[in-house]
Image: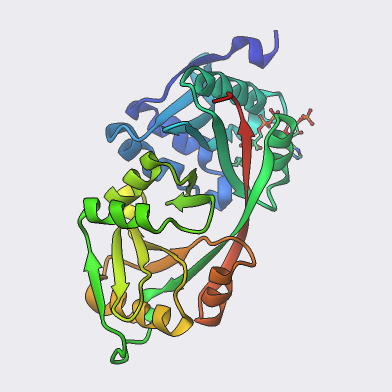
């Protein structure tokens, strides 16, 4: 009997945390974020964790999240001692079946370009590349706080943010809400407007959208989305965030623009550090 025949599938629960921490201890050199979000995502009903186990030992886990007709897959992990036996393939099939039942049209995920295991696995299951993005970040400590030429105002009201986002949609087909890329559907814009605030430069018709990552249950950073903003104004906006919004708890500002985009060039030029190259994979699973 193969390990696959013995697998039992169920929803993850808070008391699984110890086993999940054990399973993740060798992932990303012991810095896997999954144990940190486990209880928060479960208690706040942010999507669902699915675990697969055999004889009460958890051998694999993943998380899925549905927004309108888009389904997102993340934190797929297999216990190190049980890899290359088809457990990840088993979980992907389970995930795709669940997503179809929930009437999702597209299924999507992000992985590092360098993660050959993950890319092979998903490409084998019908996912293909739709976007490349790059992670950029800057430590708040390193931002200078010179006096500002530009005046900024802040909008925190979610209804106002939603109507501004509707009026001037961002250029990209997919936008990252924290680390999940969604189409700009009313559901995604609503979620975004409830979890962000806008910084408006007085001399511009455009805005900088800031998502505090704690709204997504992880960390204390600020994530920026922007388009049509000059380098100088964006640089001043960083000082504005540091002077007027951040506290000692906030450590950095990050952004995940499309690779080689205008936004990426601006972040390069104003001193953001560039790290992981990412690829967003997608599969159409139901027709509309
Ligand atoms: C990626 C991961 C989930 C794969 O789990 P797994 O149960 O070993 O995968 P499977 O046995 O189902 O493999 C299915 C296919 O994926 C590909 N694959 C899996 N591991 C691979 C590796 N180390 N190198 C290259 N391809 C690999 C292969 O195409 C494989 O098919 P094959 O065995 O017939 O060649 C596992 O290695 C893992 O937990 N890694 C750490 C976390 C991670 O990177 N998660 C994915 C991104 S969120």
Q: Is residue 217 visible?
A: no
- Residue farthest front in this picture: 167
Q: Is residue 191 visible?
A: yes
Residue shown at 53%/55% (left/top)? Answer: 172
Q: Position of residue 108 (x, y in %)?
A: 56, 38
Q: Position of residue 93 (x, y in %)?
A: 62, 21
- Residue farthest left in this picture: 157
Q: Is residue 87 above or below residue 35?
A: above
- Residue farthest top in this picture: 1
Give the image quadrant in which the ligand numbered 1 is located: top right
Q: Position of residue 218 (x, y in %)?
A: 36, 50
Residue shown at 46%/80% (left/top)? Answer: 230
Q: Which quarter of the rendering shows the N terminus?
A: top right
Q: Is residue 49 left or right of residue 111?
A: left
Residue sitting nearer the eye, 234 or 274: 234
Q: Position of residue 149 (x, y in %)?
A: 31, 90
Q: Is residue 139 left or right of residue 131?
A: left
């Amino acid at each position: 009997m193969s390990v696959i025949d013995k697998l039992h599938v169920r929803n993850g629960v808070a008391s699984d945390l110890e086993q999940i921490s054990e399973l993740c201890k060798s992932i990303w050199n012991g810095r896997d974020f999954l144990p940190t979000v486990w209880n928060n995502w479960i208690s706040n009903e942010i999507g669902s964790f699915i675990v697969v186990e055999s004889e009460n030992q958890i051998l694999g886990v993943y998380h899925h999240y549905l927004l309108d007709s888009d389904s997102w897959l993340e934190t797929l992990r297999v216990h190190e001692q049980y890899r290359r036996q088809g457990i990840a393939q088993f979980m992907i099939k389970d995930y795709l079946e669940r997503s179809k039942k929930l009437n999702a049209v597209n299924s999507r995920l992000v992985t590092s370009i360098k993660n050959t295991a993950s890319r092979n696995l998903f490409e084998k299951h019908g996912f293909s590349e739709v976007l490349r993005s790059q992670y950029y970040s800057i430590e708040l400590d390193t931002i200078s706080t010179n006096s500002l030429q530009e005046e900024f105002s802040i909008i925190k009201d979610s209804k106002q943010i939603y109507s501004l986002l509707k009026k001037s949609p961002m250029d990209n087909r997919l936008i990252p809400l924290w680390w999940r890329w969604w189409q700009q559907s009313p559901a995604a814009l609503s979620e975004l407007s409830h979890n962000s605030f806008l910084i408006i430069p007085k001399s511009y018709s455009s805005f900088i959208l800031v998502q505090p990552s704690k709204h997504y249950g992880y960390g204390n950073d600020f994530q920026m989305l922007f388009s049509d903003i000059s380098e100088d104004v964006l640089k001043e906006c960083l000082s504005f965030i540091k002077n007027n919004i951040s506290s000692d708890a906030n450590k950095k500002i990050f952004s995940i623009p499309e690779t080689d985009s205008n936004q990426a060039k601006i972040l390069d030029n104003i001193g953001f550090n560039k790290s992981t190259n990412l690829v967003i994979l997608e599969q159409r699973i139901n027709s509309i």
